[in-house]
Amino acid sequence: MPTAWRIGRGRISLELRQFFRDRESAVFNFALPVLLLIVFGSVFGGQDLGGTDVSFAQYFVAGMIASGILYTSFQNLAISIPIEREDGTLKRLRGTPMPKSSYFMGKVGTVVVAYVAQIIVLITVGRVFYGLAIPTELSAWVTFAWLSALGLIACTLLGIAYSVVPRQGKGASAVVAPVVLVLQFISGVFFIFSDLPTWMQNLASVFPLKWLAQGMRSVFLPESAAALEVSGSFQLPLVALVLSAWCIGGAIAAVVFFRWSPRGTN
């Protein structure tokens, strides 16, 4: 019999084909971030921030890379899983000998590949059109790696848990997309975080996107940009602690709330 790992690899291939054929996924995960980068970069890109040599375009690209984690994991799963639940895909899969772990392996594999593709696109656009500075220090890429790993784990698990909220697959995007948009507004993606009202900063600090964006700024912005942070530093140890806590909380939530069948059915 095929192992769970072998079946999982087959699921990854299948999930990827479905993902890239889905126009909605393409818009949400690739076209929209690039479009936002072009719009905000064109309007504010030439402005320096707080008397530093950091342009808004650099600041914004770092935030959009953090948002890319949210797009490809939380948003993608919270929309696609309800659709599969409603059309009976999950129920049929549950009745097959395929291990449940293989199904989730397929989802995780898709998230990772989509994230890598999106990051390449965003960095390329940022570099070509807005002069984004690419880190040259190994330490910066190590930070990028653990930020991406913790962010993907946390947001993937939260997306699996949140997938129970939409009652219908067709309306899932209407329930999920506003949450992502609000988090971007309050987490320092579209605006300088320290310029936001205090209550908004406190609210954003509860959620992982604020910490992901802050961590990504430490990777793609110079050390002088730390002065733009509320605390005057990037607080990477605290970033790691908060994201790790969200990984644990997301795992618990995914186990407790995930459903294979629509609510009200067996």
Image (cartoon, rainbow, N blue to C red):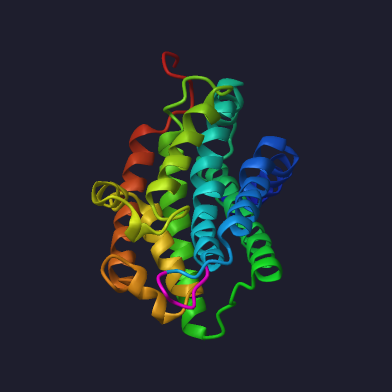
> Is 240 colored magenta in this rendering?
no
Left or right, 19 with respect to 256, comes to: right
The residues colored magenta run: 50-55
Give the residue furthest to the top. Answer: 264
Of the pair 18 and 122, the residue shown nearer to us:
122
Tell me the residue at 47%/34% (across/down): 178
Would you say residue 95 is visible in this rendering? no
- Horizontal and vertical percent for residue 144? 49, 71
Q: In this view, does 260 lie above or below 39?
A: above
Left or right, 14 with respect to 251, comes to: right
Left or right, 68 with respect to 150, comes to: right
Main SS, magenta region, reads: loop
Tell me the residue at 29%/56% (across/down): 245
- Horizontal and vertical percent for residue 45? 58, 63
Q: In this view, does 97 lie above or below 264?
A: below
* Count of residue discs: 0
Of the pair 74 and 42, the residue shown nearer to us:
42
Q: In this view, does 50 lie above or below 167?
A: below
Of the pair 43 and 104, the residue shown nearer to us:
43
- Horizontal and vertical percent for residue 16? 69, 47
Would you say residue 46 is visible in this rendering? yes
Tell me the residue at 42%/27% (across/down): 165
Left or right, 265 with respect to 232, comes to: right
The quarter of the image holding the C terminus is top left
Tell me the residue at 60%/59% (across/down): 41
- Horizontal and vertical percent for residue 228? 36, 69
